[in-house]
Amino acid sequence: MHRTRTFLFFTALVTSAVSLRAGEPPSVKPPARTRAEVAAVLRHAEAAPANPRALRILLVAGPKDHGAGQHDYPAWQKAWAPLLAKSPGVTTDTAFPFPSEEQLAAADLAVFYLRGKWDAGQLAALEKFQNRGGGVVTLHWAIGVTGDPQGFAARVGLAYPSAKYRHGIVDLKIAPGHAITRGFPATLRFTDEPYWPFVGDATRVQVLATSDEKSGPDGAVRPVPVFWTHEPAGGGRAFVCVFGHYMWTFDDPLFRLLLLRGMAWAAGQPVTRLDALATEGVTMVD
Ligand SMILES: [Zn+2]
């Protein structure tokens, strides 16, 4: 069953690799969120823990590979290390372009924002980290893989061998029933980039949000996963966020909230532990 599914995913990849989207209109920066819509989500959140335990977060970035305002992994690392360190009990470390064994050994959570390679050496390091309970978060092209797609899918649930994508407005459909998405509306608009298809065992992930894309046979519209969680058999937790093409997304308080909760969840912490950072320094309108 699993082998059949994997084969079908690969077939879809091979047949679609020559049909990348072209002629897309340039994306327009989305309007700022209103204070009211952000407050409406936060209102449902449980209080963050009063005396959280020490949490060591490792931020991993790679060389920039797109134009201005896109895939700016170094700028993210520079902004988010001090942002996260504002949260009680959090200390941060940074790596470029991949952490040393010592850095992974010293971290509770590793967040990757880079173009994913995920070869045998990197996967072995990741597996060792997860097997002792380390949390993994991947942002945007970090779910891409030029090395071992199935090996990487075993770590984070599904992997993306960089086939199809679309830039622009996404009316994200958000699934209820997980602490990460608690309080979120059923649909929320972003301007970013979904990817498809993925390889791996779709039964081993919990999908938290999807985008309707022409991803099915003959261009039929089908939901593709954009946020999901995965718990590898050997231990640890992974949270995957496909968004993160445009840097403006990182200053969207509701995107931040999903990401920060995913980070806390992956680290085995109370999910709302980092919630306060969602609105830290961001612009909202009345
Ligand atoms: Zn992108």
Image (cartoon, rainbow, N blue to C red):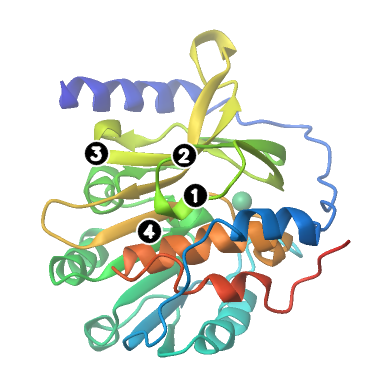
Q: Are marks 1 and 2 in contact (CB under 8 Å)?
A: yes
Name the residue that disc number 4 marks: 117
Q: Position of residue 154 (x, y in %)?
A: 22, 48
- Residue 181 is labelled as 1
Q: CA distance from mark 1 to mark 2?
A: 6 Å
Q: CA distance from mark 4 to mark 3?
A: 22 Å
Give the residue drawn at x 37%, y 88%. Answer: 51
Specify the amino acid type for callout 1: Thr
Quarter of the image where the N terminus is located: top left
Lower position in the chain sequence, tag 4 or tag 3: 4
Name the residue that disc number 2 marks: 176
Give the residue drawn at x 60%, y 63%. Answer: 256
Name the residue that disc number 3 marks: 204
Specify the amino acid type for callout 2: Pro
Crowding at mark 2 (Cα within 10 Å: few <14, some 14-19, many 20+): some
Give the residue drawn at x 55%, y 27%. Answer: 18
Q: Toward which corner of the image does residue 155 lie, by quadrant?
A: bottom left
39 lies left or right of 34:
left
Q: Position of residue 101 (x, y in %)?
A: 23, 83
Q: Secondary structure at mark 2?
A: loop
Q: CA distance from mark 4 to mark 2?
A: 32 Å
Q: CA distance from mark 1 to mark 3?
A: 19 Å
